[in-house]
Amino acid sequence: MFRRRIGVLATVLALTVSTAAGTPGHAAQPAGQDDLSSTSTRDSDELGAAPRLAAPAGAITFSEFGLGTQITTQYRDQGVVFNEGSFITADSANPTSPVLSGTPKFQGEIALEIVDPGTGGPAATSGIEFDVGYIDSRNSVEIAYYGLDGARLGAVRANAIGINHIRLPLAGIHRVTIDNTEEEPAGFAIDNVSTGTALGGRQVNRMIAMGDSYSSGEGYIEDIEKRLGRDPIAYDCGTAMRDARYHENSEWLRFELFRGDHVRCDTTTKQPISFADARKRPAKQYENRCHRHGRAWPQQVSRSLGVAANDFLFTACSGAVTENLGLISGTGEAQYRMSPNSVAGGNIQVTDAKNFKAEHGSPDLVTLGVGGNDASFAGLVKACLAPDLHTIFGTVDCRVSEGSDISRVNGPVFDKLVTTFSNLRAEFEDAEVLVYGYPSALQAALGCLPGTFNAAEREYLQNRFLPTLNQAIEDAAATAGVTYMPLFAVTAGHEICTGTDDAPAWVNALRLDDIQESFHPNQLGHDAIAAYFLKHYVDDQGRLLFANPEPNPTIRGPRGPITVAVGNVRADPSGQCGVECLQPACSPSDCALRVRGENFSPNSEVRIVLNSDPVDLGTVTTDAAGELDVTLPVPTSVPDGEHRVDITGASPDGIAQIASTPVMIERVTLADPDAPPSTTTPTTSPPAPPVSTSANAPIPQGSPQPPTSDLASTGADVALLAGIGLLAVLVGLLAIIIERKRRRQNPAD
């Protein structure tokens, strides 16, 4: 007779996550009563979590017309019209009430368009600002903006609890939409709309461009230039040198066997040098693979703005993480300590930037793109590639690490970005700082790489991981008080697999001839990003349309723990268990797992999954205090052995987190009460030590480890070992066949 028991090997997990200022309060007031209606679920003494900005002079405040007025063309003389269904209402959560709501009240989309005040025809503006709120759930409301041609220019989220002041300091904005993308408990409204607010005042005379491979120009393809009839270029002098011995201060290898008509440079003067001259120099070990080039978008922007070559510093380097910038610990770590002298990459990037400032004066503009390597994006891509290349060995796809991927981005990566951006702003206090996200790289519905990404992996990378990473960058920028430029929409429609011979894609697919160039924007992608910046972030005189905003520390509030406990098996045994039980036994038909948790987002869904072969135990809803206590049945199909319970939910400020704990499920033979006592002393395996999982803690044993940029893939080693084992079996079989054939040919043996 078999019974099941569940012994909990680890029961308590602590996840460090963000919690917003304040906690949810009473329910929303009835929507039909203007004197009571509110866009917040919070008590009056909790309102105002986000800092308020005074409405600029001339702003549309919606106090110009009475409550209940349907608003469409009433503000045409101010150059703004609104979509049908928009109406003025009171909002007790907004100190500048009345406000404008969509239909249904506080839940419907609000759209506005810029028009010519005289004719009412389509027009565009340089900069638009307004308030949106009251936001009870961070990032639940998206603000998207479009050009006159209907192209989506970008989108931002209302990322703070409270009334959010939205600044879109771009030229060419024609249409703006504001709508829910996730649950916003009591809805939202807008107020204090101003147009033409972009600055257009600062000329760029000195510029510094920092960052990783998406800034440096990694991804340049010479064949694209040939197909388009353009002259090819090379990576900047000294930035494409593999680890080897070279003639000192030159790109010439110590033993250059096939010199041909190659042109190499002197890494000090950046001028061409012949092999005959270089060979007179002593040998020296060098390495620098920053892969910068003249068609990278920061280079194009500096030239278009008229910045002199010696007043532009380009330190971006392929593979850079925040530690290589040197803005966190104060020391940092250089990427290429054996880089040639005077080639950026041999120092932490901020050291070169400080030296530039001391020699040339403070820059007017500093650009920075970083975070992807901190989030292990390269490792994740490799993990997504590897399983489908080895499906014969039964490996799983890269989504198995989704929980740890997202937790890493929203935890330590976000923290590093905030510190980096804040210190960069402080170091160059007289400069405008522009940080940016990552462009769209692939389309979830489009597959053209057989044996690589499957549909679910494309969906995860494109619609889950990259948006989460970009949102973390945007939130960190707002927290630190620097301008954020979204790039996701810039390459949309031109991602991997969209190109033709005459119109190549703007993002490289897998390149087996040079893996490092894979999944990066090529020169066409950089052309598009440069054009986007010049069209929307500077005026027709080349002056910047943006300035550093004030830091907003309320974007992600003080941290508090989510605590989850898994255990306390519900017991209703029909027989005796004896000394073998670690916990009370349960029958296969009545085996259940109790899950308790606290400090989740109130009234939110929490998903509970039993792994390794995923078994969805169900989705439950937390109570008004953000707590849960639920008992879920364990299906009889779940085999014996060690498993992992994953509990996925959101913290009070909407940050996705996952908690995990191992559990042991075993079949045991229950003692027969009529049988004589056993003379054998039963033994039990000692339980494993408790495991604590957080954004920085190791994943429990048996869980997939998060990929890192220096690992080929998750699961690739298993596949390799399996392949070697299979090969050994085949070789053994072949040897047996050959031996039998030999014996048939030589009976005497």
Image (cartoon, rainbow, N blue to C red):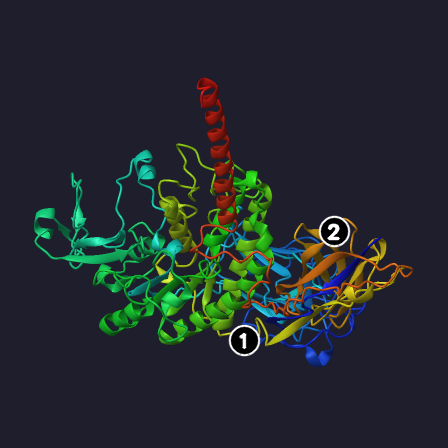
Residue neighbourhood size for the residue with mark 2, other residues' Cα within 10 Å, grouped as few (<14), some (14–19), many (≥20)? some
Q: Is residue 423 above or below residue 435?
A: below
Which one is in front, 680 or 274? 680
Q: Residue at x 57, y 74 (%)?
A: 554
Q: Using residue 406 as the reference point, say whether residue 748 is left or right of it.
A: left
For mark 1, give the secondary structure: loop
Q: Residue at x 41, y 73 (%)?
A: 328
Of mark 2 and mark 1, the one earlier in the sequence is: 1
Which one is in front, 335 or 418? 335
Write down the quadrant of residue 45 in the picture. Answer: bottom right
Write down the quadrant of residue 512 in the picture. Answer: top left
Q: Using residue 146 as the reference point, say whether residue 499 is left or right of it.
A: left
Percent across and percent down for residue 222 are 31, 40
Residue neighbourhood size for the residue with mark 1, other residues' Cα within 10 Å, grouped as few (<14), some (14–19), many (≥20)? some
Can residue 107 be seen in the rendering of this structure? no
Percent across and percent down for residue 675 are 89, 59
Which one is in front, 68 or 732? 732
Percent across and percent down for residue 596 are 75, 68
Picture disc at residue 358: none
Percent across and percent down for residue 317 are 34, 58
How many marks are shown on the rendered structure?
2
Name the amino acid type tagged 1. Pro
Write down the quadrant of residue 696 in the picture. Answer: bottom right
Q: Residue at x 82, y 65 (%)?
A: 578
From the image, tell me which residue sits under label 1: 553
Name the amino acid type tagged 2. Val
Which one is in front, 72 or 497? 497
Spatial distance from mark 2 to mark 1, Cα to Cα?
46 Å
From the image, tell me which residue sits under label 2: 638
